[in-house]
């Protein structure tokens, strides 16, 4: 069956336009549009445009009564349909999407059950999805003279405007409006209202080059590579030189010199006239990381999520012209238009942030391997604690494993001490926040004028407000999560929808006064350090304090320059930081992720401990690590403490194999969300039943539907169904087809289909 179709024929009831009889044309184009239907649409090509309409060019086409931008996927001189409309305009003189990316997006559409047009949409910079391009961005700042008085005036009457104004006042500078809205989870209407009051300024400015564009960090080239580095490099270079596709798992402990291997490999690729893409987790895309690449190569391009549309667009053009041959970036940089790719590196390949959380829900690691295959390039997946998917793939020979088991410095690993906080005395705050052991080591570290990192993977002061009367916790009215107390802003905040409220004086359920602040987030840790280590210079690094990239850079620079003694933070500090004077790392609580209702809970915990621990003792000075937990016997924690990834992976894989979870099977999650609980439940049930029928006789396990672990988000009820499939191409294909058909037959709400989900919450 042809994938191409006709817009008028497909949805006649949606558009009250007359079908157009096909004018006889010499050429027809199949066009992928950003629509959730698994077909391309056919248009006739006006004869004057025909020579230039080729696969990969953008065109404007009529769609119903609208005009849309799409990408031509193929052309043909024949057309079976009897009704087609002509395309309206040609937007590019040359293909904007080369054949390589065209193929890659088609692969994504098939693998992740979305439309080709939706996959293409993810690839193109926003500016290229419209007919006209704008190089301007809107920047918000507080009008002069506006301050706490105005803030107080709208505190209770205009909660959204209040959040915008408070954040801008805190920033004490300008921020791009889009970024501000993204962080506050708001549309821009609150900011527009503030502008009308004359309290904030919204200015359209030419987008600058971006700070990461200029970072350069000296990284001296090592005199010679370590033997294990040379061995790993030799294997990969051999494949590179033969222009042979191969995928590697570079399993190297933290400090084993993986970055040096990447640099050397890319250097070789450039000598051979080929380009490179380096993917790092968004959080690890620091000036330090980028700077390493900049100091070694000319013309390194950076792609990250905080770039403006205009910056992204300029970068895309630069890459297309071949002005930069190396790209360092987060997830979406895998689509960078680099011709003749030689190397793709995915550093920290186990990171969940490589999975995109909206359509197309691709996993950049898997896309990287596929892109490398198409480009006859080599793909290097690097990690100290690989995902079990990659680890198992290496065991089965689908990836070639290269091991770097020791640290370059020759110092070995700093010991990890696991402290059972259940046996610690309760401190004056009613919390076992810091164990005696951690306090002793912190004191010693500060006395030696060395630095410490304290990790706590929660924001705010207290994650839970608890009533001792009715034993209830304070919850968000719109989401199924507890509200966290944020002391500095004196409010309770929902970490799911970002709404906030003044804390109630009494329990809303039983009216008993005095809710208790239970547990500790990074804000409390920061404040407590000031109490237990007076005089220590403390800085906090989490998304509350680091609204702008500049803040992040300034804090890292201060830490690097020794102006900060203790860095407290969330996962923002877990990755990539390489500061030789850090000799103590404390994980205040390792239990946060351990009890999540997700089969990867143990894996995530193990990875996080290993990663945070890897920040200590990276230089000449010996490091020490304290892990505080209430589950010291948990295998994930024990293995991390023993620096024994292999043991953990083997144990965990046995469990997964028994349960048929990845890597021993594939998962697809279907999520149903609706404001009406009834509608969510009913649709989930009907959909799942229809799906079961379609899949009858296939070796697919269908679990559910059931309420999702977080059953309410932003007033939308959530139900989900989980499918477990074997690694078998025909079953997978049949399942995806059944999902697509069932989804297309579902009229009430559109389920989210998440292939290879990285979170089941
Ligand atoms: P990883 O990425 O595996 O954690 P890095 O590549 O950051 O490790 O290397 C760790 C440290 O060792 C860095 O400070 C780096 O400069 C240094 N290093 C790497 N390779 C060598 C080498 N061959 N000789 C000396 N120092 C090296
Ligand atoms: Zn909420």
Image: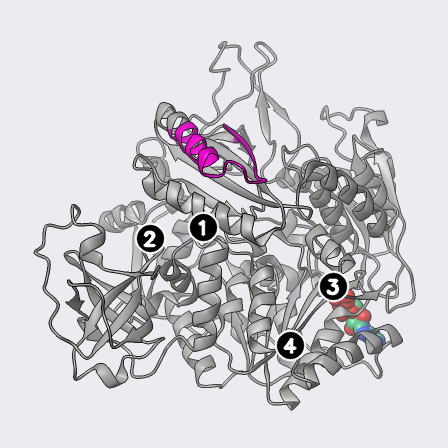
Dot 3 beta carbon under 8 Å from ligand 1: yes
Left or right of 113 in this view: 129: left
Depth check, mark 1 against mark 3: the one in front is 1
- Mark 2 highlights which residue? 37
Mark nearer the viewer, 2 or 1:
2
Find residue 198 and report its horizontal and vertical position in percent: 25, 51
Quarter containing the C terminus = top right
Answer above or below: position of 608 versus 341.
above
**Which residue corresponds to mark 1?**
358
Residue 476 makes an appearance in the image: yes
In terms of secondary structure, where does tag 3 sit?
loop
Closer to the N terminus: mark 2 or mark 3?
A: 2
- Above or below for 118 versus 155: below
Could you say which disc has been placed on residue 293 in the image? 4
Earlier in the chain: of badge 1 and badge 3, it is: 1
Which residue is depicted at the point 28% across and 46% down? Answer: 189
693 magenta-colored: yes
Residue sticking out furthest to the front = 697
Instruction: Please give the residue where the numbered disc 3 appears in the rendered image.
Output: 578
- What segment carries the magenta color? 683-709
The percent position of residue 640, horizontal first and vertical second, equals 82, 46
Cα distance in 3D space between marks 4 and 1:
30 Å
Q: Decide which of 77, 104 is in the foreground and name it.
A: 77
Task: Give the image quarter of residue 482.
Answer: top right
Q: CA distance from mark 1 to mark 3?
A: 32 Å
In this view, the mark in front (2 or 3): 2
**Could you tell me which residue is drawn at 84 percent across and 27 percent down?**
424
Crowdedness near tag 3: few (<14), some (14–19) or many (≥20) residues, C-alpha within 10 Å: some
Residue 613 lies, with reference to residue 633, above or below; the image says below
């Amino acid at each position: 069956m042809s994938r191409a179709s006709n817009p008028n024929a497909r949805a006649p009831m949606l558009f009250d336009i007359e079908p157009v009889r096909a004018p006889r044309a010499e050429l027809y184009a199949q066009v992928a549009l950003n629509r959730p239907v698994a077909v391309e649409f056919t248009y006739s090509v006006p004869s004057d445009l025909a020579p230039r309409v080729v696969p990969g060019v953008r065109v404007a086409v009529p769609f119903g009564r609208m005009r849309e931008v799409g990408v031509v996927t193929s052309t043909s001189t024949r057309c079976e349909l009897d009704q087609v409309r002509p395309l309206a305009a040609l937007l590019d003189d040359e293909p904007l999407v080369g054949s390589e990316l065209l193929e890659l997006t088609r692969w994504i559409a098939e693998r992740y059950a979305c439309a080709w047009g939706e996959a293409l949409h993810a690839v193109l910079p926003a500016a290229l999805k419209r007919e006209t391009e704008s190089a301007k961005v809107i920047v918000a700042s507080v009008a002069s003279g506006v301050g706490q008085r105005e803030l107080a005036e709208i505190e209770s009457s205009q909660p959204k405007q209040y959040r915008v104004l408070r954040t801008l006042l805190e920033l004490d500078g300008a921020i791009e409006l889009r970024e501000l809205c993204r962080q506050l989870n708001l549309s821009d209407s609150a900011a527009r209202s503030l502008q009308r009051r004359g309290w904030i300024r919204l200015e359209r400015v030419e987008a600058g080059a971006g700070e990461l564009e200029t970072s350069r960090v000296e990284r001296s080239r090592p005199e010679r590579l370590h033997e294990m580095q040379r061995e790993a490099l030799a294997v990969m270079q051999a494949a590179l030189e033969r222009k042979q596709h191969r995928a590697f798992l570079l399993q190297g402990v933290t400090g084993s010199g993986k970055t040096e291997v990447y640099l050397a490999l890319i250097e070789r690729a450039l000598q051979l006239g080929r380009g490179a893409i380096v993917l790092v987790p968004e959080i690890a895309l620091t000036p330090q990381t980028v700077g390493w690449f900049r100091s070694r190569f000319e013309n390194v391009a950076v792609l990250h999520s905080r770039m403006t549309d205009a910056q992204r667009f300029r970068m895309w053009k630069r890459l297309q012209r071949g002005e930069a041959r190396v790209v360092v970036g987060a997830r979406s940089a895998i689509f960078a238009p680099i011709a003749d790719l030689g190397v793709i590196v995915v550093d920290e390949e186990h990171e969940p942030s490589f999975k995109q959380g909206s359509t197309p829900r691709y996993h950049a690691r898997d896309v990287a391997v596929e892109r490398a295959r198409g480009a006859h390039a080599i793909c290097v997946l690097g990690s100290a604690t690989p995902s079990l998917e990659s680890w198992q793939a290496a065991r089965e020979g689908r990836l070639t494993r290269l091991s770097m088991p020791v640290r370059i410095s020759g110092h070995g690993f700093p010991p990890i001490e696991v402290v059972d906080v259940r046996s610690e005395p309760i401190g004056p705050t009613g919390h076992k926040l810091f164990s005696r052991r951690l306090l002793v080591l912190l004191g010693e570290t500060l006395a030696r004028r060395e630095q410490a990192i304290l990790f706590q993977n929660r924001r705010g002061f207290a994650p839970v407000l608890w009533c001792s009367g009715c034993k209830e916790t304070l919850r968000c009215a719109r989401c199924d999560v507890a509200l966290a107390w944020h002391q500095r802003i004196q409010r309770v905040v929902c970490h799911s929808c970002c709404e906030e409220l003044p804390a109630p004086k009494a329990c809303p359920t039983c009216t008993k006064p005095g809710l208790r602040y239970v547990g500790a987030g990074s804000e409390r840790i920061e404040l407590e350090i000031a109490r237990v280590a007076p005089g220590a210079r403390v800085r906090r690094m989490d998304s509350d304090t680091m609204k702008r990239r500049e803040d992040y850079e300034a804090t890292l620079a201060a830490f690097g320059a020794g102006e900060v003694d203790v860095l407290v933070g969330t996962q923002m500090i877990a990755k990539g930081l390489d500061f030789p004077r850090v000799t103590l790392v404390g994980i205040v609580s390792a239990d946060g992720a351990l009890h999540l209702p997700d089969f990867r809970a143990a894996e995530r915990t193990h990875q996080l401990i290993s990663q945070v621990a890897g920040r200590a003792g990276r230089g000449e000075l010996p490091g020490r690590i304290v892990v505080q937990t209430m589950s010291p016997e948990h295998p994930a924690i024990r293995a991390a403490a023993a620096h024994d990834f292999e043991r953990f992976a083997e144990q965990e894989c046995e469990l997964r194999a028994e349960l048929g979870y990845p890597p021993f099977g594939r998962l697809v999650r279907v999520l149903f969300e609706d404001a009406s609980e009834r509608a969510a439940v009913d649709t989930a049930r009907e959909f799942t039943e229809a799906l079961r029928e379609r899949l009858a006789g296939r070796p697919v396990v269908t679990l559910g539907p059931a309420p999702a672990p977080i059953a309410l988000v932003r007033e939308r009820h959530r139900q989900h169904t989980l499918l477990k499939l074997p690694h078998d191409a025909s079953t997978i294909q049949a399942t995806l087809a059944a999902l697509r058909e069932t989804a297309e037959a579902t009229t009430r709400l559109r389920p989210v289909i998440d292939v290879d989900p990285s979170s089941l919450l």
